[in-house]
Amino acid sequence: MLDVNGLRKTYTGDGRTIEAIRDLTFTVADGDLTCLVGPSGCGKTTLLKCIAGLLPPSAGTVTFAGSPVTAPPPGMAVVFQEYGRSLFPWLRVAANVELPLRQKGLARDRRRELVASSLAAVGLADAHTAYPWQLSGGMQQRVAIARALAYEPRVLLMDEPFAAVDAQTRADLEDLIRGLWQRLGVTVLFVTHDIDEAVYLGQRVLILSASPTVVREDLAIDLPSSRDQLHTRALPRFTELRTHVYEQIQAAKRSVPA
Ligand SMILES: Nc1ncnc2c1ncn2[C@@H]1O[C@H](COP(=O)(O)OP(=O)(O)OP(=O)(O)O)[C@@H](O)[C@H]1O
């Protein structure tokens, strides 16, 4: 579904050059839930922007379902960390969710159907007429997720989507994403700096090196596919996996080879 090949990104400007990503190569299969973790500043957001076609890479290619990505492709949706800036405060919740569907050219009845089903899927069936600023942070992030789902993407890119919500809401939203992924079969690429979150959510965790970034390890998460916050996190295997990822990220920060 996604093929990232030899991706490199260098930022230039003000007489400075920052090599954010050196050489990234990996693939994501159709229907996978892959988490990306790495030290702070290693280029996770840069990578997602390149995959989403929002930023041109300096070298290398991104291919989505067989076609090269050169601009935001139809079929991909992105959920960012800052829900406060991603929803339009002057539009009600339903209108926020509907906006990309208008741009997609869908008929009114179909738009209404998708808005209703995606808001119901994130537990906000009653919030259609509210404005985003009348909702809690966690509810606003649910609206952003509903908007992405309503678009019926083949790939959902998520950039630290729960970083700004409290711990309990975060746990609920993690379970929401796993549930939606299992139900809808969407391919998910989930960026997080939270090691426990990556291990809890992912079928696979890609550990990135410190900047300039390469893939340090591609780790299969061999936990049972039915997960819950209490029991999965208490499993000895969960602890082993999180310890391993933690050690790898610490080593990456010290630039110790994998
Ligand atoms: N627009 C930009 N111009 C110049 N440098 C940039 C720009 N955006 C990011 N960078 C640099 O690229 C590197 C990677 O940044 P990026 O935000 O992609 O990392 P990140 O892993 O998402 O960070 P964090 O974990 O802190 O969210 C950093 O050194 C950053 O300063």
Image (cartoon, grey):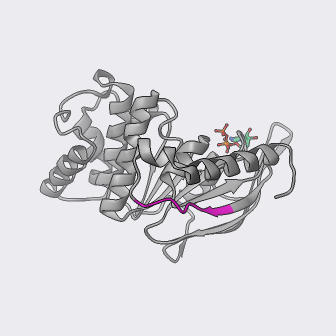
Q: Which residues are magenta?
A: 218-225
Tell me which image quadrant ligand 1 sits in. Answer: top right
Please name the residue shown 37% across and 38% down the image. 172
Q: Quadrant of residue 83?
A: top left
- Could you say where residue 62 lies in the image, as x and y percent from the top left? 61, 67
Please name the residue shown 81% across and 58% down the image. 258
Taking 193 as reference, is 105 above or below it? below
Please name the residue shown 39% across and 53% down the image. 178
Please name the residue shown 28% across and 22% down the image. 134
Residue 221 counted in the magenta span: yes
Q: Is residue 137 left or right of residue 27?
A: left
Number of marks in the rendered image? 0
Between 52 and 171, the one lying in front of the other is 171
Q: Residue furthest bottom?
A: 66
Q: Is residue 215 visible?
A: yes
- Could you say where residue 9 lies in the image, as x and y percent from the top left? 73, 55
Residue 99 counted in the magenta span: no
- Could you say where residue 128 lies in the image, as x and y percent from the top left? 19, 35
